Image (cartoon, rainbow, N blue to C red):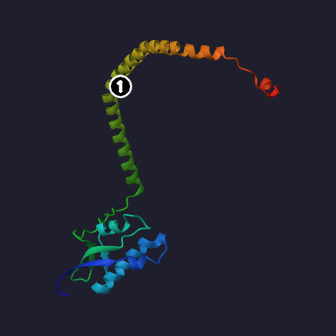
């Protein structure tokens, strides 16, 4: 290969996943997409971009899209990169692995981290202790104001409740046993 090949495809996925069980449909759609690219781009090394992957999986495992418009590039080494139409292909970020530490270094890092955390907590407690005292005073003042208002509201409730209670006392209530022993007229 001497140069890079760039093409755009609308890939039909529905025919590929229609006869598969619902819980396997998106997996099948990904395989259909890769098979299409292998056939049309003549390469076995296929890479899908993150946005294309998101579009395939956005509605879950059971509901993949029926078709996808894709921009495909094939470089000199034969690597095929597919990405959703309108976006540039970006490799997934690779996590750099650090050299494994021995037990002594791990413990020292943990101790240093805990010491930093403890210092930060002490500073935060000192800074937040003053506002907490002010908040307590405000809360106490609100409670005192509510206590002063409560007796007035309870008097109103008592006045409105009296006539209803008097009506209940005026009506005669017969016990259940007396009601059942009476003969119907």
- 174 with respect to 28 (left or right): right
Residue 142, x across and y down, in percent: 38, 19
- 15 with respect to 78 (left or right): right
- The part of the image, by quadrant, that contains residue 49 is bottom left
Q: Quadrant of the C terminus?
A: top right
- The part of the image, by quadrant, that contains residue 135 is top left
Does dot 1 land on a helix, a strand or a loop? helix
The correct choice, above or below, for 116 with respect to 159 in the image is: below
Q: Quadrant of the N terminus?
A: bottom left
Q: Which residue is mark 1?
A: 132
Point out the residue furthest to the left here.
3
Residue 56, x across and y down, in percent: 35, 69
Residue 94, x across and y down, in percent: 30, 66
Q: Is residue 114 visible?
A: yes
Residue at left offset 56%, top offset 14%: 163
Q: Toward the viewer: 13 or 36?
A: 13
Residue at left offset 25%, top offset 68%: 90
Q: Toward the viewer: 185 or 110?
A: 185
Q: Is residue 44 visible?
A: no
Q: How many marks?
A: 1
Point out the residue furthest to the front here.
185
Q: Toward the viewer: 52 or 45?
A: 52
Residue at left offset 39%, top offset 48%: 110
């Amino acid at each position: 290969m001497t140069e890079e090949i760039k093409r755009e495809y609308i890939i039909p996925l529905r025919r590929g996943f229609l006869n598969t069980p619902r819980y396997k449909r998106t997996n099948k759609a990904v395989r259909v997409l890769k098979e299409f690219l292998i056939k049309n781009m003549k390469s076995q090394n296929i890479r899908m971009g993150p946005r294309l992957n998101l579009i395939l999986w956005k509605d879950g495992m059971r509901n993949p899209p029926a078709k996808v418009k894709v921009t495909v590039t094939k470089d000199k080494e034969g690597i095929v990169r597919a990405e959703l139409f309108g976006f540039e292909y970006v490799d997934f970020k690779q996590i750099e692995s650090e050299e494994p530490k021995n037990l002594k270094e791990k413990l020292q890092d943990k101790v240093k981290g805990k010491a930093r955390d403890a210092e930060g907590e002490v500073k935060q407690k000192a800074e937040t202790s003053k506002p907490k005292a002010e908040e307590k005073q405000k809360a106490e003042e609100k409670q005192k104001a509510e206590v002063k208002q409560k007796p007035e509201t309870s008097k109103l409730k008592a006045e409105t409740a009296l006539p209803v209670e008097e009506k209940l006392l005026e009506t005669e209530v017969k016990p259940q046993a007396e009601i059942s022993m009476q003969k119907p007229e």
